[in-house]
Amino acid sequence: MPSLDTTFGLLAFRDALLLFPLAVLLHVLEEWPGFPAWARRFASPRYSDRAYLVTHVCAVALALATTGLLRAFPKPGLVIAFFALCFGPGVFCNALFHTGASLWSRRYCPGALTGLALYLPLSALLAALAVREGLIGVPALGCALGVAAAFHVLEVGHNVFERW
């Protein structure tokens, strides 16, 4: 099996981060306007287009801001926070959510395609590069993704399913 260095050569974490805002934008374009309709049908009839737009404008802005911050200051503490509170819930866990939601509802959940085709590979790439560069250890990455999963469940449960 080829190594990370063979596959990605000299690609650095800070450079691969530039893919993050682009992936978020493409994901939002796939979701809109179908996800709010899916959510009203399968999650909560009160889920609004406005709630979707506010959340996802903030998501794109956050992707741009964290990319700029981490490119300027690629410090381990910031990388752990990035995977736990921003990238992990918004990208990695989001891909799993859309896939699971499609299977659960037996209907395509808008966002599943970019979740599988962009979000999961980008998650693997950024995680591998961050580990390779010593910005995060494997145990810390696992903990960060655990926090991300909890955060994502709470956020989707509150905002989409209106459970908490």
Image: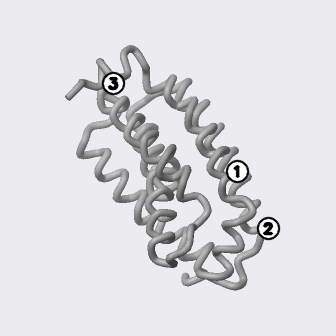
Q: In this view, does 106 lie above or below 5?
A: below
Mark 1: secondary structure: helix
Q: Say which quadrant the N terminus sits in.
A: top left
In front of the other: 73 or 160: 160
User: Is 160 on the left or on the right of 150, as rendered?
Assistant: right
Q: How crowded is mark 2: few (under 14 residues within 10 Å), some or many (20 or more)?
A: few
Question: Which residue sits at x=50%, y=70%?
Answer: 102
Residue 134: quadrant of the picture: top left
User: Is 156 on the left or on the right of 131, as rendered?
Assistant: right
Amino acid, disc 1 = Leu
Of labels 3 and 2, the one closer to you: 2
Mark 3: secondary structure: loop
Question: Which residue sits at x=70%, y=70%?
Answer: 36
Tag 3 residue: 133
User: Is 52 on the left or on the right of 18, as rendered?
Assistant: right
Question: Which residue sits at x=70%, y=66%?
Answer: 34
> What separation in Å lies between label 3 and label 2 (alpha carbons)?
40 Å
Q: Which of marks 3 and 2 is nearer the N terminus?
A: 2
Amino acid, disc 3 = Glu
Of labels 1 and 3, the one closer to you: 1
Mark 2: secondary structure: helix
Q: Earlier in the sequence, mark 2 or mark 1?
A: 1
Tag 1 residue: 29
- What is the number of callouts on the image? 3
Q: In this view, does 78 lie above or below 100?
A: above
Tag 2 residue: 50
Image disc number at residue 160:
none
> What separation in Å lies between label 2 and label 1 (alpha carbons)?
15 Å
Contact check, label 3 and label 2, Cβ < 8 Å: no
Q: Earlier in the sequence, mark 1 or mark 3?
A: 1
Residue projecting furthest to the left: 1
Q: Position of residue 133 (x, y in %)?
A: 33, 24
